[in-house]
Amino acid sequence: MPSLKPSRPALVDLAQRLASALALCLLFASPLCAETDFAGITAAERALGPDAPAYHALQEGRVDEAAGLLRATLASNAGDALAHQLLCRVFYVQDKADDAIHQCELAVSSAPAAGDLASNSHLWLARAYGMKARHAGPIAGFTLARKVAANFSRAVELDPNNVDALDDLGEYDVSAPSIVGGGNDKARSLASRMMPRFPASAHHLLARIALAENNPSAAESEFRQALAAEHSPETWIDLAQFYQTHGRADDALSAVRSAVAADRAHSPALVDAASILTEAKRAPDLAERCLRDYLSSRAKSDAAPAFKVHLQLAKLLAARGDNPDAEREIAAAAALANEYTRNARPAQGH
């Protein structure tokens, strides 16, 4: 599903290039970070954990700050699996595949043999391998794809209720051929296992299978069943993306408006909504509002990194000739992720 969950984050896209080239571009996801009172917490406790500054900084898109906190933690405890996993995610959101892989490999090797930490470390390692595969040639891509499949599968084995891992494994199965561990039969089997507990995700996977088999009417039916099972911004965005891809611009716009209306938290789904509108060249004012509402919300996450959203907003503003506001958004991005913004700036057209 799109953003993460995919809000999923994110969700979030998986593609395949094999034979002449193989590339996998994966959905991501991450939990939303709640506001936390840090008073009375020890320095070690404050550095890590889902309610701690390093995690909170990552969710807010303050990746330079998060990296500093995590490096300080690892300097005193090099075997901290959670710190390695979070640092992997810091690199991942900046599109630094090799650094992300290194940190996630350390997280996997340092994590307990079972449990949430181990499962999520394998999940993020799979995503990092998938990011590297996106730019790999056919031989390297083949090897990386096998690693992606193995780590998604391991994440599910370690925690059968890890819905993020289940979603990503299903996307991989649909996108990748059987020679690298994918296939629609495997995806159908996984959807069947998911249906009792995660029906929206299961219907989304069945829709993806239908699309892979060139059956758009069945896909639309499955997307609508996912919406019925989980009336959420994310399921509306899934439907909107389907309509957009199939040339149904008015239906896509209607679904986007429904997603926005349903998203009271202003989650990463708003970023997906803005992307759909921008691609369709529809309702630019609504797209801008979606991005601004997300950036001012408490629902930000690394499913839609804030520094990338600032750059997305800058591009939207520049397209309408509002260069001073665009420059302010670029400056806001640089304050969160200076190196990434410096490297990305030419792509913004400034």
Image: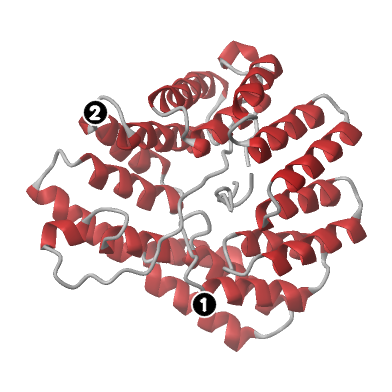
Picture quadrant of residue 48? bottom left
**Residue linked to disc 2:** 109
Q: Residue at x 52, y 23 (%)?
A: 145
Q: Residue at x 75, y 79 (%)?
A: 285
- Looking at this view, name the residue that lies furthest to the bottom: 324
Quadrant occupied by the N terminus: top right
- In this rendering, does residue 176 appear at all? no
Quadrant occupied by the C terminus: bottom right
Q: Residue at x 53, y 24 (%)?
A: 141
Percent position of residue 58, x then y: 37, 59
Q: Is residue 138 left or right of residue 223?
A: left
Question: Which is more N-terminal, label 2 or label 1?
Answer: 2
- Looking at this view, name the residue that lies furthest to the left: 76
Residue type beneath disc 1: Ser
Tell me if residue 165 comes above or below residue 248 in the rendering. above
SS at mark 2?
A: helix
Percent position of residue 173, x then y: 62, 23
Percent position of residue 340, x then y: 43, 61
- In this rendering, does residue 31 appear at all? yes
Picture quadrant of residue 63? bottom left
**Foreground residue among 107 and 20:** 107
Label ID, residue 106: none
**Residue linked to disc 1:** 296
**Foreground residue among 120 and 131:** 120
**Foreground residue among 35 and 152:** 35
Residue type beneath disc 2: Ser
- Looking at this view, name the residue that lies furthest to the top: 179
**Foreground residue among 140 and 243:** 243
